Image (tube, rainbow, N blue to C red):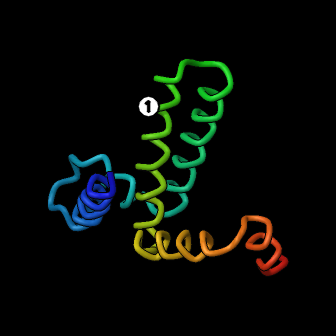
Amino acid sequence: MNDTLTTLVATIKSRRSAITDASYTRQLLDAGTERCAKKFGEEAVEAVIAATCQTPEALTAEAADVVYHLLVLLESRNVAWTDVVAALARRMAQSGVAEKAARPKS
């Protein structure tokens, strides 16, 4: 499973410098972070809808879309997937309640 994500992250990164604009990923990245964020949000809403009133298969498909668009959004901001994984690992070292309480108030 991790290999699939690692491969997808590398593919998305490579699309940034692809020569052709035939790549959907390249089109999203060229449109900028705002467009990437909007698309991620749209996909997240579709996942919520699938979770509440559609089949498990529909939710699976929407979840895959959410993950892909999150990775594109991260790439648009030059945030490394490995940094996200590291943040998750740090959070796993403590309870969710304690981790949330330790976050800076904004």
The quarter holding residue 99 reads: bottom right
Q: Is residue 88 left or right of residue 103?
A: left
Q: Is residue 46 left or right of residue 84?
A: right
Q: Which residue is mark 1?
A: 61
Q: Is residue 36 left or right of residue 68?
A: right
Tell me if residue 6 comes above or below residue 84 in the rendering: above
Tell me if residue 89 comes above or below residue 42 in the rendering: below
Q: Residue at x 49, y 39 (%)?
A: 63
Tell me if residue 78 comes above or below residue 16 in the rendering: below
Query: Quick one: 47 or 33, which is closer to the camera?
Result: 47
Query: Quick one: 91 or 23, which is closer to the camera?
Result: 91
Instruction: Report x, y in % for residue 18.
Output: 18, 62
Report the residue that reaches farthest toward the left.
19
Q: How many marks?
A: 1
Instruction: Report x, y in % for residue 2.
Output: 33, 57
Q: Residue at x 59, y 19 (%)?
A: 54
Q: Residue at x 73, y 65 (%)?
A: 96
Instruction: Report x, y in % for residue 64.
Output: 43, 40
Instruction: Report x, y in % for residue 9.
Output: 31, 61
Residues packed near mark 1 inside 10 Å, few (<14), some (14 to 19) or many (20 plus): few
SS for tag 1? helix
Locate the C terminus by quadrant: bottom right
Query: Quick one: 41 or 88, which is closer to the camera?
Result: 88
Q: Residue at x 38, y 60 (%)?
A: 29
Kind of residue sitting beneath label 1: Ala
Q: Is residue 80 left or right of residue 13?
A: right
The quarter holding residue 100 reads: bottom right
